[in-house]
Image (tube, grey):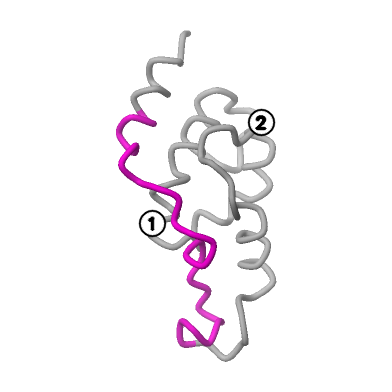
Amino acid sequence: MNCVPLIRDIYAAFSNHTYPGDNEIVHCEYDERWGGTLQGPCHECREVVNYFKGKDNRPLAAHKLRGISFSLFSLAPQAFLFWLPSFLAAAIRNPREADMVL
């Protein structure tokens, strides 16, 4: 099955979403900025920020996204819309490798 047209359509559907900025990747509920008690994001959210910081949304590999798939629940809205095509494309291209993404 040729998945290239589907992946191209997914990226086209989200093409108006731009990189959210380094400070808008995660809105950690534990961070004081977002109503929490920590001076900065929790360990898991810091891991998400460190992974996605400065990354484009296209070249992300399925095995990398698999390891950070928990981030789908913590990404800020703009970041979610920016990187969702990467998760979808990884799941389509390599569903076994991206199993946690699914």
Q: Amino acid at mark 2?
A: Glu
Q: State the residue position of label 2.
A: 97
Q: Which range of residues does the magenta coloring cover?
A: 10-35
* Local secondary structure at mark 2: loop
Mark 1 closeness class: few <14, some 14–19, many ≥20 residues within 10 Å? some
Q: Earlier in the sequence, mark 2 or mark 1?
A: 1
* Local secondary structure at mark 1: helix
| Magenta region includes residue 12 | yes
Alpha carbons under labels 2 and 1: distance apart: 26 Å
Answer with left or right where residue 66 lies relative to residue 82.
right
Residue 35 position in % (x across, y down): 46, 87
At 54% from the left and 41% from the top, the residue drawn is: 56
Q: State the residue position of label 1.
A: 78
Along the line of sight, which residue is nearer the eye, 11 or 74? Answer: 11
Among the 4 quarters of the image, the one containing residue 15: top left
At 44% from the left and 37% from the top, the residue drawn is: 85
